[in-house]
Amino acid sequence: MTHTPPFRLSMQGRRIDRAYPQAFRFDGRHLRGVQGDSLASALLANGQMLMGRSFKYHRPRGPLASGAEEPNALFGLGQGGRFEPNQRATTTALVPGMILRSQNCWPSLDSDIGAINGALSPVLPAGFYYKTFIHPRPFWKHLFEPIIRRSAGLGAAPTDPDPDRYEQAYGFADTVVVGGGIAGLTAAREAAKAGGTVLVLEQDSHWGGRTPTDHAGGQAAIDALLADLRARDTVTLRRATMATGLYDHGYLIAREALADHDPNLGLPRQRLWRIRAGHVIAATGALERPLAFACNDVPGVMLASAVRDFIADYGVAPGRRIVVVTTNDDAYRTALAARAAGLDVPVIVDARPVADGALPQAARAAGITVLTGAGIAKVTGGKHVEAVILCDQSGEGRPLQTIACDVVAMSGGWSPVVHLYSHCGGKLLWDEAQSMFRPDPDRPPLGADGKGNVTATGAANGDLRCAGALERPEGATLPVWVMPARAPYKLRAKMWLDFQNDVKVTDVELAAREGYASVEHTKRYTTLGMATDQGKLSNINGLAVLSKALNQPIQATGTTTFRPPYTPLTLATIAAEAKGDAFQPLRKTPMHGWHQAQGASFEPVGLWRRPYAYPRGAEDRHAAVTREILAVRGGVGTLDASTLGKILVKGPDAGRFLDMLYTNMMSTLPVGKCRYGLMCSENGFLMDDGVVARLSDDSWLCHTTTGGADRIHGHMEDWLQCEWGDWKVWTANLTEQYAQIAVAGPKARAALERLPGTIDLSPGALPFMAWTGGEIAGIPARVFRISFSGELSFEVAVPASRGLELWDRLHATGQDLGITPYGTEAMHVMRAEKGFIMIGDETDGTVIPQDLGLDWAISKKKADYIGKRAQARSHMTDPERWKLVGLESLSGKVLPDGAYAVAPGHNPNGQRHTQGRVTSSYHSPVLDRPVAMGLVRRGPDRMGEVLDFPMPSGEVMQARIVDPVFYDSEGSRLNG
Amino acid sequence: MADTQDLTPLALITPVTGFGMITIRADLDRAGEALAEGAGLALPDRTGLTTDGSRMLAWMSPDELLLVLPLAERNEALHALTQALMGEHGLAVDVSDARAVFDVTGPRAADVIAKLAPVDAAMLPEGHLRRTRLAQTAAAIWRIPGGFRVTGFRSTADYLQLILTNAALPGSGLAPR
């Protein structure tokens, strides 16, 4: 029959306010809803029943439900950065000016070319994908995959950055009640009386769940409970907050909607709650089950509860002539609600042989025809229900009569929402009497104390009549998994189980015939329950059909696993505040602002930003690096070395401890001296390096790499706390206490001596690898004479608060010396010219110090150090290992970093054998030629040999194996 | 949603300077009394802090304390603590320059903390220091009159100020709406 307006009823609609119309756009059309509408109710009020297309066959789809379980009515919502796919129309509130786009259809929702897939359905059976993976293979790659890829994919990914703000918050409560219906509010009141704090979360913006809709006096009962709870200061009521998942130790994740789809509020759009719950009460209600009859997917076939929700909550008539088909008493409420709203209910089709409860009697008293023992053989209609053909439920579907209608309200009974109970390991039991899985109270999820930490209550616990005095007695539900009971294949092939993914009764039966006995395997093979609704409606019906096909009881089949999130969470909500400037902490040295003011080009080093170079004027980075190197090698430069780790190690056992941590001896280091040290993992691999200075008889200062500061401090504490608890050693990470400035170059001493101070920097007083303390420019300082550039070099450490002051003074007084700030790239090039290794360049977690020719820094005398045993293993002492050498490019072009040197022959994959790779490679401005280091098989034994480095372009670059020290090999520049 | 019309931040975020901070590591059972005398404050209980309104001595771990005091008193205190640890295996070291400090004050200061630290901020008792994190960086939090004081690492000062200010966005209080 024709679907005719008006669709908005003049009465009812507890959630809407007709006085406030709200305009929105749907696929370019201008429509109007009213304040309080959901997108689904607003569209229905405009006569728009067709709301989507199914995933596989592109069948027309209308809304099936009114809540979070809706599988069909999904839209692309918003524009630009605020566009979001797959927004559920039944749970998205209408906001004025909203722009909706239909999904999974082309060229339009109304005439979708993809619907041809439906005609092809006999050749797209369950497991189609998997079958074509196997045979014939070329068909998959060249035929099926391209076609499926084009037609698949529900919704489009947004292309622009999300402009909205999100946040998170931590919550704590002794009891968290999930669900603000009558069961949840009652449980909250009991919990509050028992003591402790209570947090109640309700997914909807309205309290009460189904009670106000389903029961006379329901709203008053809810209001009374709310008033009681609001009067208690231990109770927090939070609505529009969806508990999406429960994890170990009562860790509950929930999403609070603050300004969904309403950027004008200037608020964070959503807030992710991370809640520690002492005990969780799952009062999550139940979901109505669809019935499997032929063509149950035609738009206009809806859940009975949804039909009365649209009528009672939104004042919308999904249709004007509504046939109810049911297996229980509850659906009679829909018939009564429809009739009360002035809509026509030609018949209630009840599959049960008898229906004599209070509700059926009320329906009959209202003059509604009730047919018992009856079923629907088939729904007719394409894009909208036109009629139902009735039959005997017990038979094969022989048509008895045809009844014109525009909506079919179906109810196959109710399934408790057991997700929260199940997320963390709670088990379910099959309740034969009520035909439902419900939480097994004897096998709850367990908390840290080994006791159950989730209790289910109300409908979520299988108590479908939990509204207490408001309830009327109801007859039992008849389990009906296929309608009619002995429906032939032709009808079963049109009975949808999963509406979004197009899984039908025959698909599950086929899977069973093909040997899929496990419900988990059947799910993946047929894609049942794998759509964006995660099987909220299809799960129980599907496994009941599977059980029947396998000829086993439902409890033997069991359910698939319920995993979080209950409804989708956007990634933005999970990222919360961590976006834009706050994406990550950006660590800044005391001189960071100066670098910025000088126009430094920064590079990330760990979470720090370090100046890579300081381009001047029109200089590019490369030119700046060249200038900085020449300035250091020819005069003096300053490097901000504040990011280097500085760990104080003190105590009577500190020397012994450092001897274990480093490969060389630190206990013998005299006070006032420095020594370069290597640190290895237990497996022998080099993990950090740096200069250690002995500060006093019982204290050492260990410099680490920038990225190693926290890691090495943790490594030290790990060994002290877990292995050597009796060693008397304290550590303190002083990395941020000091600003450190490297002053390097032949004029470094002159530059420092320009500043007044108490420190004698002369070669006799402060030789290479010594340190001393005192004052420079009135600032307390330690000066370490160490060098990473090969030049005369002093590293000056001062309190962080005075680092910038010293830096400024150096630059002010050293101007005529040409003092030049240099960045990390100049530092890298200069150390490579000197053949100094860099952790992370020459090492990658598989390299031992011996590979790098650092045997001189490995003590032969020590009985042990961390990594010593591992370094003695046969593979580590293998002479075939790749070892550090210098590489001299024959063409004069810089070798690409990471390039591989090939060896004769091919491996079984047809790739060239390799015998080495480039680990560092730069153009040396001071030598005016490339310098490179690399790891090469037996490298040091092969000096002078030429290696081939094939490039992706086909060109083969060649390099000669040479000594890795390219510059000042005698080391005379260290003394200025 | 009257709340959304409110243009006042949830709390005032104020950088504070002028603190001296000294990290102390020792066997507190052995050296506790001497350290308390050196610090001029009673030894705090586990997770606790003691204060005289000017100085604060906080429990950081079973073998670590933090003394917070006016910067001008730092050197003298460092000397006193070193004396207290004489003959004992201990460590007292200046970390004043390694830190950034912010005060988060106002009636809804706890909301700001609750958005960033996995801590029941509203229930954080007086006389208690919580070592935790603010979003992605380490921090310690304790109550001061009118709100909280937080300290983190100097290098993350700008980040701390940014996330605290973001969390204090007007209208974004945690009270149920």
Image (tube, coloured by chain):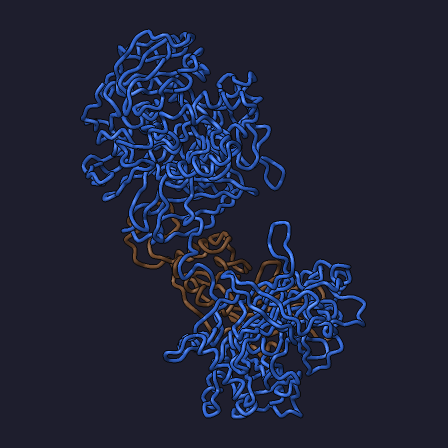
Chain colours: A blue, B brown
Judge whether residue A721 can be spotted in this image.
Answer: yes
Above or below, A219 relative to A381: below
Quadrant for the C terminus of chain A, please. bottom right
| The one of A923 and A305 positioned closer to us in this rendering | A923
| The one of B148 and A807 positioned closer to us in this rendering | A807
* Residue A426, x across and y down, in percent: 56, 32
* Residue A506, x across and y down, in percent: 45, 20
Left or right relative to B94: residue A34:
left
Where is residue A452, by image quadrant?
top right
Quadrant for the N terminus of chain A, please. top left
Residue ID at (52%, 67%):
A605
Above or below, A645 relative to A420: below
Residue ID at (48%, 91%):
A817
Above or below, A491 relative to A760: above
Left or right relative to A87: residue A523:
right
* Residue A251, x across and y down, in percent: 52, 44
Where is residue A201, by image quadrant?
top left
Where is residue A38, by image quadrant?
top left
| The one of A21 and A789 positioned closer to us in this rendering | A789
Left or right relative to A199: residue A261:
left
| The one of A684 and B30 positioned closer to us in this rendering | A684
Above or below, A282 relative to B36: above
Residue ID at (33%, 56%):
B170
Residue ID at (28%, 49%):
B2
